[in-house]
Image (cartoon, rainbow, N blue to C red):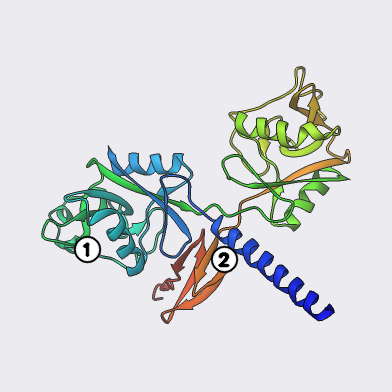
Amino acid sequence: MAIFGQCCLLIVWTIFFTNFFTKAEISLSCDPGWQKTSNGARCVKIFRNQKKTWLEARKACRSIRGDLLTIRDKEMSNFIKERFVYNDEGISIWIGLRKLSGGNGWHWLDERRPPSYTDWHVKPEQSVWSKYNKDLCAFLKNLKQGGAAWFVWTCRYKVSYICQKPIAYPCRGKWIKTPRFDSCVIVYRDPKSWNGARYRCQKYGADLLTIRNDTMSNFLRDRIVAHLNFPMWIGFHKSTGTDRWHWLEEDATPTYTNWEDGYPYKTTRKCAGLKKIGREASWLNFDCSLEQGFICERPPPPYCYYKGRSYRDGTQITLSGNSHKCINAEWRPIIPIKQPLL
């Protein structure tokens, strides 16, 4: 009976852990209307009925925490064609490839290196646009005779576009997901000075919290500050020798603040913290040497996938004989930069 009981217990625990991890994997999903790519690392969405210039399309993608699509291998190319292009005759879709006038050739978005994979219908140098000194951009087009390929056109042309963004990975352990999944946050109750708190955050690949809008303020008020009766450091401060408040290492003047009435108080108090005042999570300024709790923030962990394994951001491996690096949930080729001849 004892052996039978142990066997049953083992089976129950096996089923529990199998279901737990299966559900955890399934939870790595895309927002409604978005589709997970074939490698499971990105979410993509086509905007068929919103015709925009290349720059307008990119701005629209970035406004929803994404960017224009990058296509770095045949697998992704085939996935996009099969899902979005083949059944939509005559459609043209901006992708993230462009060539700036006076620039050094074609590149993806803000990169400077040439693409390692292309799928041109006609090579750019053979295009009618090659003789004009204009910014040129690439779009994916359904060919009436069958298939699809990349075409060159002026970036001012207005067509549909396709956005990409990293898949929403869950925050780990005690880290809490923020409203738009911009980041993960955690509260530390052990008192530290502002510098000590920042050092502690950075040990975990994070930094002190930044708050840029009411959405984040309301989230902090309802999920964190409402349950705490002590102030907590955030990343807002005045650098030595300046009289201007800013976030961490940023130079830009913030467009959003949430000071309590009468604050900031006294010019010598150069570090900001959150405190529950009534029902609000208000900002107060304190002496930076004061020891109190703090909130750390870090991005959600994007991972790259290869043959069933996940790799952390920044990992380098060899794919098809070439070095690649995991950048923002995407394998990107590492192309050696040729040194000039002396």
Q: Is residue 270 visible?
A: no
Instruction: Tell me the quadrant of the picture where the N terminus can be found.
Output: bottom right
- View extreme (front): residue: 1
Q: Residue 81 location in percent, x, y? A: 27, 59
Looking at the picture, how far across and down is residue 181, in whole percent? 58, 45
Q: Residues within 10 Å of mark 1 (few under 14, many from 20)?
A: some
Q: Residue at x 63, y 67 (%)?
A: 18
Q: Residue at x 71, y 50 (%)?
A: 175
Residue 331 numbered tag: none
The residue lying toward the viewer, choosing from 195 and 292, is: 292
Report the residue marked by disc 1. Answer: 120
Q: Is residue 304 visible?
A: yes
Query: Label 2 belongs to which residue?
Result: 314
Q: Nearer the viewer, residue 179 or 336?
A: 179
* Residue found farthest to the top: 262
Q: The C terminus appears in which quarter of the rendering?
A: bottom left
**Gap between marks 1 and 2, in whole Å?**
30 Å
